[in-house]
Image (spheres, rainbow, N blue to C red):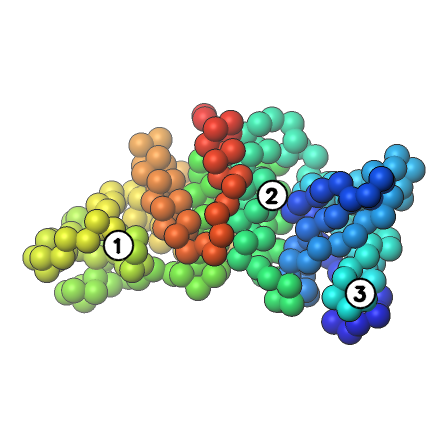
Amino acid sequence: MKNNSRFHANGIVIRETPHGEQGKLLTVLTEFCGVITVNAKNARKISAGYLKSTQLFAYSNMLLYNKNGYYTLLEAELKNDFYPLREDIDTFAFASYACEAAAAVSTAGDDGNILMSFLLNTLFVATKKMLPIAQQKAVFEFRLAVLCGFLPELEYCQFCGEPLKDSQRRSFDLSEGAVCCTDCVNASGESSESWVPISDGCYKALRHIAFAEGARLYAFRTDEETLRELGSITEKYLMPRMEKKIKSLEYFHSYGGKE
């Protein structure tokens, strides 16, 4: 983006902090510039024309001014404020976690269109409250890992080469990112603590999340025990691959996601 220029960009506010007497500094995930910091002057005034567009989770078309890499909000047209995310602690905790995690894998200057689209879908599903928070979280974590280039081997055992869908018992190497036949793992003599046995239901859910397209991403059902297993695995798989600690994850476990 050229310096000293005005431009329009769709963006999601993923963090807001007070700035000065009446303003805010916004962390915004944009379609063209990745994550940027935007100075929203007078955003805390009731009379501010872009008041709703500068709130957490708001999705807007923004008119921005770029001066030497510093962005100022000039105007904003609100597209969705995702207000239902604020109505209970579970959805708020999850949405906060999703926004922080998305911000952690994007940097200024990146093309953020795919990531922004994924986060929009995540927030939209969360507002509908049609799926358990635990399922939404597992889907978000594993699909985010895939989008970041960390798709594990889910099709064939790295030891015997046989299709994993035909395997009776499977284990997931959370460190290397591969699912293998448990018998092959045992026969190999590998004793890595990162190997975790996974149930058939969990394996099928991981494959679905990795490859499903569009609305089908969320179109699966599983029992509570499998969902707990899935959620544990997706979190343990994603977190070591993040470049920074996701502080809102602790908040999520403390206050949200207790269904």
Q: Nearer the viewer, mark 3 or mark 1?
A: 3
Question: Which residue shows up at 51% across the image and 29% down it?
Answer: 256
Q: Position of residue 172 (x, y in %)?
A: 26, 52
For the N terminus, the quadrant is bottom right
Q: Position of residue 233 (x, y in %)?
A: 34, 45
Measured Cα–Cα span from mark 2 to mark 3: 28 Å
Q: Position of residue 258 (x, y in %)?
A: 45, 26
- Residue 196 vs residue 60: left or right? left
Q: Which residue is mark 3?
A: 66
Q: Nearer the viewer, mark 2 or mark 1?
A: 1
- Residue 1 vs residue 42: left or right? left
Give the label on residue 123, or none.
2
Q: Position of residue 218 (x, y in %)?
A: 48, 45
Q: Which residue is mark 1?
A: 173
The tag earlier along the polypeptide, 2 or 3, is 3
Q: Is residue 150 visible?
A: yes
The amino acid type, in three-letter code, at marker 3 is Asn
Q: Nearer the viewer, mark 2 or mark 3?
A: 3
Measured Cα–Cα span from mark 2 to mark 1: 30 Å
